[in-house]
Structures are given as C-alpha cells and as structure tokens.
C-alpha cells in the first residue's frame, strides 16, 4: 500500500537540525501510496498501526545502521493529539489558532476539511 523513498533532506529540515542543541539523526521520505495521505485516516488506530508497520518493514534496518540502535517503528504508540498540537495544526492550516478573523469553531471546521 505504501512505498517509502528516502530523499536528500531539504534546507528547512537541515536548518532545524542545526538549531537543535543535541545530536540528532534525521531522514526525509517521499511516500507513494495508492490512496492520498491527505485522506488517509491516521486517527484510526488500526490504519495508524498499518502505516507504521509498513514503514518499519522499510526503515528498521536502515535506522539501526544509521544510529546503532535497534529500531522498531511498528511499536510507535497511537495517541490522541494534545491541545497544544491541535493548536499548532490550526495555526499552520488557518494562519491562527483562532482570533478576530476566525472563531475557534470556524478553525475547527477548517481543520476537519
């Protein structure tokens, strides 16, 4: 269902890595799928697990080699997003979490679409 292709990291990710004050290992992937990731229901725990199971099949050994740590991406726990994460998502999607131009209910509608 999903095909993962590691790509050269873009400048934005490289800049973020430079700003972090600890050593990190990052990768950037192109994901090809027979369904749009914009419509894939990551809020469904079974679909979330399927995505990370397939990613694990692709990436576990590669990440072990990169970081000398045993990785198992299929073990990523499903969590409901926090209010902070929801607010950040709304800021990215609408330009503000909510304010004079959009009410909280209006940004929630935009977020859902």
Image (spheres, helix red, strand yellow):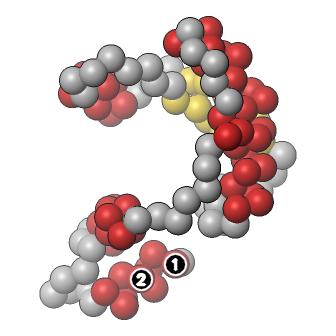
Which residue in the rendered view is the most extreme toward the left?
A: 100
Residue 21 lies left or right of residue 30; in this view the side is left
Q: Quadrant of residue 45?
A: bottom right
Q: Which residue is mark 2?
A: 108
Q: Which residue is mark 1?
A: 112
Q: Is residue 90 above or below residue 58?
A: below
Residues tagged 2 and 1 counted as in contact (Cβ below 8 A) = yes
Give x and y (percent) for residue 42: 64, 61
Q: Residue at x 27, y 90 (%)?
A: 103
Residue 57 lies left or right of residue 10; in this view the side is right
Q: Is residue 19 above or below residue 66?
A: below
Front position in the image: 53 or 1: 53
Q: Residue at x 56, y 9 (%)?
A: 68
Q: Is residue 107 above or below residue 52?
A: below
Give x and y (percent) for residue 50: 78, 49
Separation of residues labelled 2 and 1 (CA atoms): 6 Å
Q: Secondary structure at mark 2?
A: helix
Question: Would you say residue 9 is visible in this rendering?
Answer: yes
Q: Residues within 10 Å of mark 2 (few under 14, many from 20)?
A: some
């Amino acid at each position: 269902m999903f095909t993962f292709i590691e790509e050269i990291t873009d400048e934005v990710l490289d800049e973020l890595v430079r700003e972090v004050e600890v050593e990190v290992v990052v990768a950037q992937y192109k994901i090809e799928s027979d369904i749009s990731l914009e419509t894939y229901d990551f809020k469904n725990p079974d679909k979330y697990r399927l995505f990370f199971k397939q990613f694990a099949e692709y990436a576990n050994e590669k990440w072990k080699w990169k970081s000398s740590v045993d990785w198992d991406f299929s073990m990523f726990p499903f969590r409901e997003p926090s209010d902070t994460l929801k607010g950040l998502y709304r800021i990215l999607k609408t330009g503000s979490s909510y304010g004079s131009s959009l009410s909280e209910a209006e940004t929630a509608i935009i977020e859902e679409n």
